[in-house]
Structure formats: structure tokens, C-alpha cells
Amino acid sequence: MHVMTEFFGAWEQRVVFLDELAASEHEPEAFLLASCYIEALGHGLYPDCEGSQRAFCKALIEHGGSAVFGGHHPRALKDWLTHAQEAWARGVAVKVGAVLDGLIGTLFTEGELRRALEPYVTTAEMRHLTPSLWHATYAAVVYTDTRSEAVHNFPATAVEFSASTFGGQAVPAINYRLLAPALKAILMHCEKVSFESRLYFGHDLRKLFSATSSKV
């Protein structure tokens, strides 16, 4: 347990450093590091998750401390459907593109978005669409519009959504002030499950790594 305490103590120091970095006129750098830390912690919580974006989104939605991360953005869904590799997705984009355009300005729960689209798609298409709706979450927008942009074209410009609402409240801008409390909440959850289970992130990572290596 001493080693685990040191491990998470180092993580806590990283988070403190980010606040200091942001306060010293280096908020873009703090944002970039915070997004990378969320992705790393997400991989720890969901080691069998397919892809970095999925782990990042699950961590934000399930443990980021704000329901807005799970809100679904119509524009994000249209963009993903339009550019998806799957033929069914591009077909759905043709059917619901105009509908999604009419919904822009509001973030929706998954249930609300499904109900809005059900009249325009087949049952089979909805079966395909439902597990892919996470691509439209605000967490996914954070990843695609700012986190990836910050990594490849630093610094990323903060994305404003002041004209959009979720649950009657204005959607916050994507910046360090949004990610900082989310990162702290995710780290707190990681520490809780780790110390309660006596396993890092609640998983026997040695078994997971061994299983991964055996497939190579």
C-alpha cells in the first residue's frame, strides 16, 4: 500500500502543478497536460477500452463530476456520421442531417436524441447507431475539437458554446477551467477504487498486460 500511496501522491502533485502552471499565464499548456492526464487515467480505469478517445470520454462522462460531458451535441453526431467509415453511418447521415441541423443549439441526453431520430431511421439502423452515440457527447467534442487540436497544433483555441444549452443551462466553454475539476474528480475516483480493491485502478493490470502480450 505504501507504493500505491506514493504512486497517487505523484499524481496529486502533477495536478497541483497544473493549477500553478495555469496561474502563471500558461493555461494552454495546463489544458494540454490535463487532457493527457485524463486520457492516461481513463486507460487505467478502462484498460480493455478500444482506443484513446473512448477511454477519455468514459472517464469524463462517468467520473468527471459534470453531467454536461454526457450531453449529446447534434452537430458532433452529424460530423461523425458524415465522415464515418461505416456505410450504414453515412446512410443515416443522409436521412437525419437536416433533423440534426434543426436541433443545433441544445445538447440532449441519449434518450432524448434517440427519440428525436427514431422517426427517420429503421430499427436496424438505430441498433447500429445507439452504441455509437458516444461520438456525439460533449466529452467527445472536448477530445476532437480541442484535445487533439492542442496536441497537433498547439496551442488550441478555447471553444465557446455560450449559445448552446443543456438542461436549461448554458454549456461551458472548453478550456482549462472546465477540465481542472474534472481531472481532480477522476483522480479521486481512481484513488478510491484502487485503495478499496488494493489493485491499481481496481484491476489486476499484470493479468491484463499478460493477456495483451499473449495476443501479439
Image: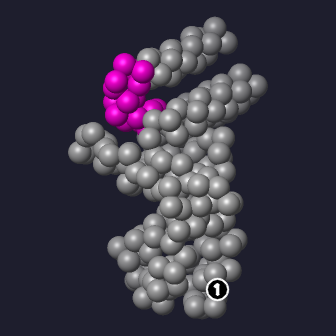
Residue drawn at (35%, 73%) of the image? 83
Q: Main secondary structure of the magenta part?
A: helix
Vertical arrangement, residue 72 with respect to residue 157, above or below: below
Q: Which residue is mark 1?
A: 118
Q: Quadrant of the N terminus?
A: top right
Q: Going by the image, does 82 lie left or right of 46?
A: left
Whether residue 23 is visible here, answered yes or no, is yes
Q: Going by the image, does 21 lie left or right of 154?
A: right
| Residue projecting furthest to the left | 153
Q: Under tag 1, what secondary structure?
A: helix
Give the residue type that dot 1 points to.
Answer: Glu
Q: Who is closer to the viewer here, 75 or 91? A: 75
Q: Who is closer to the viewer here, 56 or 156? A: 156
Vertical arrangement, residue 205 with respect to residue 140, above or below: above
**Residues shaded magenta:** 21-37
Residue 86: x and y in percent read 41, 77
| Residue projecting furthest to the top | 2
Q: Is residue 5 magenta?
A: no
Within 10 angstroms of label 1, few (less than 14), some, or many (20 or more) residues?
A: few
Residue drawn at (50%, 35%) of the image? 177
Residue 167: x and y in percent read 68, 60
Whether residue 70 is visible here, answered yes or no, is no
Vertical arrangement, residue 49 with respect to residue 197, above or below: below
Residue 57: x and y in percent read 53, 50
